[in-house]
Amino acid sequence: MTIVNPILRGFNPDPSILRVGDDYYIATSTFEWFPGVQIHHSRDLRHWRLLTHPLVRKSQLDMIGNPNSGGIWAPCLSYSNGTYYLVYTDVKSHIGPFKDTHNYLVTASDICGPWSEPVYLNSSGFDPSLFHDGDGRKWLLNMVWDHRKGRNRFGGILMQEYDEKAKKLVGPVHNIFRGTSLGLTEGPHLYRRGDYYYLLTAEGGTRWNHAVTVARSKSIFGPYEVDPENPMLTSRHNPDLPLQRAGHADLVETQTGEWYMVHLCGRPLAATRTCNLGRETAIQKVEWTADGWLRLAGGGNEPLLEVEAPSGLPVHVFDESPHGTGVDHFDDASLNIHLNTLREPPDESWLSLRERPGYLRLRGRESFSSAHGQSLVARRQQSFVAEAETVVAFEPETHQQMAGLVYYYNARNWYYLRISRDEELGKTLAILTCDRGEYDEPLEQEVCVEGWPQVYLKLKLHYERAQFYYSADGKSWTAIGPMLDAGRMSDENAEAKRDGVLLDQGFTGAFIGLCVQDLSGTRKHADFDYLAYREDDET
């Protein structure tokens, strides 16, 4: 029996894995999307479901004003003496010489919460990790950012003791590992096995040179000896591998003593070498050698698409669709678990499931360019072949009022099929696009839908191709606009430089969303009757 990778498809990066009894949990980064941190659950390491989000309140996570790909970076999930611990970074800036990275801790007695109010830890760097030592002491690790000219920006892995009673870090700060020649040392996780402390780090950067480095020491403070066959995992030397960008890993031991490692990966589109599904999570079976080093069970150091499943763990398939495929009729009192908002939790002032029962009502606020008040509800694209459909009732009074279906990566990269109003044509459909901040309207003539009480909208995705459609009745569909490049909704396209200076970077993935803008400030609303999301099983 095998496990097919990736196990968490579509924008689920920086995995932190935890076993408590017979249950396995993986926490992943969510960046500027709310709620914060995704936690998936499994009992056999093969089948996973999205279980919960721990950061659901603005008091836990206030991302208003955060930049693209700011917010939650690399959470770490751990457990000790009946308590779950989650440490995470809220990134307020990350372009240029400085990074404003605030690290926090929340706890819960149940994985599904409620989770506590956050305890502030430090701001010295990102990718925090909490290690519970056998003597009861707790240690926080994080990479340290060094902005000084001529220095290694990734300045090593810091460690400091956490006093649980005082709820703060105490004692001296130790730089326990300054990395290898691969560089960009981050993502630390610490383990104790036998006589050694083992330190896993991510190196080489989260793009094509990503890698997993292992080092060990008999003292928690070091010095740490690097695996002589470093890197332990990477795709950097083989561009033909289906799983690229392999790195940022974490370990778990099964109930029967087998070891597995989850890691970040990306699956590039063949034509463009862009990963519009974002950075995903894969798993590899690993084993310990006689001399105490970690190796892939299949040999070598390249990630496998299929790995041997654990022996002794019964197959456990969940009833629900792992990606939330199907039709959401907005009949529940709250948004379903697969839907997300930008930077802030839903609020009745702009999002309502009650004002018109069975509909999602969104009140128009700011444009996609804003890092503050956007009326946008979206879900991850989790398959290369997928489609999304909705129907919207909207009566705009001005060109500044818009509503519709968006294919969204970040504020500078999106495709938008929108309803608005033209002074001559009345209510119209048009496509708006933004590619690395360059705005365009590819239709020569907007499509008049004046007098239509509602408009059906659809987006079909097939690898590199994205095509919008519209309909009056939801049965007969008409393509609108050109075939668009789905690969533009990717980290690779989002990264922009001018004269060698980084202007923008991205770490997320493509989303499909429902949205309303009202640039006149009157908060005109639109009503969405449903959101359908379907995938092709071949991917």
Image (cartoon, helix red, strand yellow):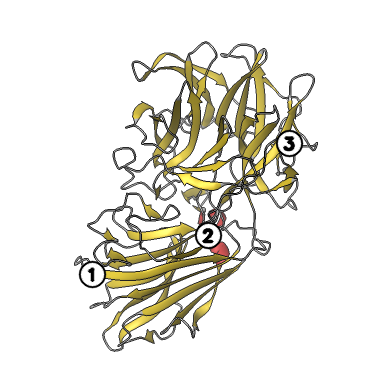
Front-lying residue, 22 or 2: 22
Specify few, some or many for label 1: CA neighbours under 10 Å numbering under 14, 14-19, or 20 or more.
many
Q: Position of residue 385 (x, y in %)?
A: 60, 66
Specify few, some or many for label 2: CA neighbours under 10 Å numbering under 14, 14-19, or 20 or more.
many
Which of labels 3 and 2 is toward the front?
Answer: 3
The disc label shown at residue 106, or none: none
Tell me the distance, in whole angstroms, between the alpha carbons under discs 1 and 3. Answer: 57 Å
Residue 229 visible to the viewer: yes
Tell me the distance, in whole angstroms, between the alpha carbons under discs 3 and 2. Answer: 32 Å
Sequence-first tag of 1 and 3: 3
**Element type where label 1 sits in the image:** loop
The disc label shown at residue 524, or none: 1
Q: Position of residue 99 (x, y in %)?
A: 42, 37
Q: Furthest residue to the left?
A: 522
- The quadrant in which the N terminus is found is top right
Residue 455 to residue 253: above or below = below
Task: Determine which residue is flagged by label 3.
Answer: 311
Residue 181 visible to the viewer: no
Front-lying residue, 419 or 84: 84
Sequence-first tag of 3 and 2: 3
Which of labels 1 and 3 is toward the front?
Answer: 3
Q: Is there CB contact under 8 Å for labels 1 and 3? A: no
